[in-house]
Image (cartoon, rainbow, N blue to C red):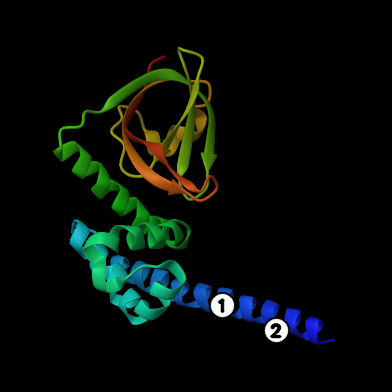
Amino acid sequence: MKNKTLIIFIIFLQSFVIYSQETYMNNIVEKACECLSEIDKDEDLTDISIGLCVLSEATKYKVELLRDYNIDIENLQNEGEELGKMVGIEMFTACPEQIKRVAMLNEDNLNDQGSSFQYMEGTIKSITKSDFVIFSVLGNDGKTVKFYWLKFIDSDNDLQNEYESYRGKKVKIRYSIAEFYDPNLAEYRNYNLIESLNILD
C-alpha cells in the first residue's frame, strides 16, 4: 500500500512540475509575442529589441529557468542564445507573423555579411498553405526542394493572386537560406526563403 501511495505521489509531483514548466514558459512566450507585435511594423527589428522582448518576462522566472533548464539569467553573455532558441521554438507556433519578421532580420544580417542569393529552376509540383505558403519544386537534377514564402516576393507575375495556379509551371527562384529549429526533428535545419519567383513558360 505504501509503495502504491509513493508511486501516485511521484506521478502527481512529475505532472505538477511539467504543468508548472508549461505555465511559465507559456507566459514568457506570450509576453514576447505581445512585445514584438507592439513594435511598429515599419520599424526594423534588431537583435537587441528581440532580446529585450524575451527578457522582459523571462527575468521573472530566473529561479525556475535555472532549475528546469540550467539557464542562468545572470549569465546571459554565455547562455542568452540558448534562452532565445528555446523561446523561439515556442514562438514559431504561437506567433508566426512575428517569426516572419525575425526571419527577415536574420536574412538581412546574412546579406550584410556578404552572403549571396542562390538560384534554382524547376517545376512546381505542389503548393502547401498553412501559416506560410510552401512551394515544392522539382529541380532539373530530379530532386524536390521546398521554398518558403515569408515576405514580399519580387515577381514579374501577379504572384499574390495567381500562385495557386502555378502547379506544373516551370519557374526560376532566387532564394536565401536561414536556419530555424524544427521541433519535429528536434534539431536546426535550413529553410529556403524566396526572394523572387518568375514563370519561365
Q: Amino acid at mark 2?
A: Phe
* Along the viewing direction, whichever of 52 and 38 lies nearer the viewer: 52
Q: Amino acid at mark 1?
A: Val
Q: Pointer 2: residues within 10 angstroms few (<14), some, or many (20+)?
A: few
* Along the viewing direction, whichever of 127 and 199 lies nearer the viewer: 127
| Residue wearing tag 2 | 9
Query: Vertically, is 112 above or below 61?
Result: above
Q: What residue do we see at 48% from left, 50% from top?
A: 131
Q: Are marks 1 and 2 in contact (CB under 8 Å)?
A: no
Q: Whole-percent x and y of residue 35?
A: 30, 71
The quarter of the image holding the C terminus is top left
Q: Whole-percent x and y of residue 55?
A: 28, 72
Q: CA distance from mark 1 to mark 2?
A: 12 Å
Which label sits on residue 159?
none
Which mark lies nearer to you, 1 or 2?
2
The quarter of the image holding the N terminus is bottom right
Work out whether residue 38 can be spotted.
no
Q: Pointer 1: residues within 10 angstroms few (<14), some, or many (20+)?
A: few
| Residue wearing tag 1 | 17
For the view shown, which residue lies furthest in the right direction?
1
User: What secondary structure is found at the residue carrying circle 1?
Assistant: helix
* Mark earlier in primary sequence (1, 2): 2
Q: Whole-percent x and y of residue 97?
A: 38, 56
Tell me: 43 left or right of 121.
Answer: left
User: What secondary structure is found at the residue carrying circle 2?
Assistant: helix
Q: Quadrant of residue 171?
A: top left
Query: Vertically, is 129 above or below 80?
Result: above
Q: What residue do we see at 40% from left, 38% from top?
A: 191
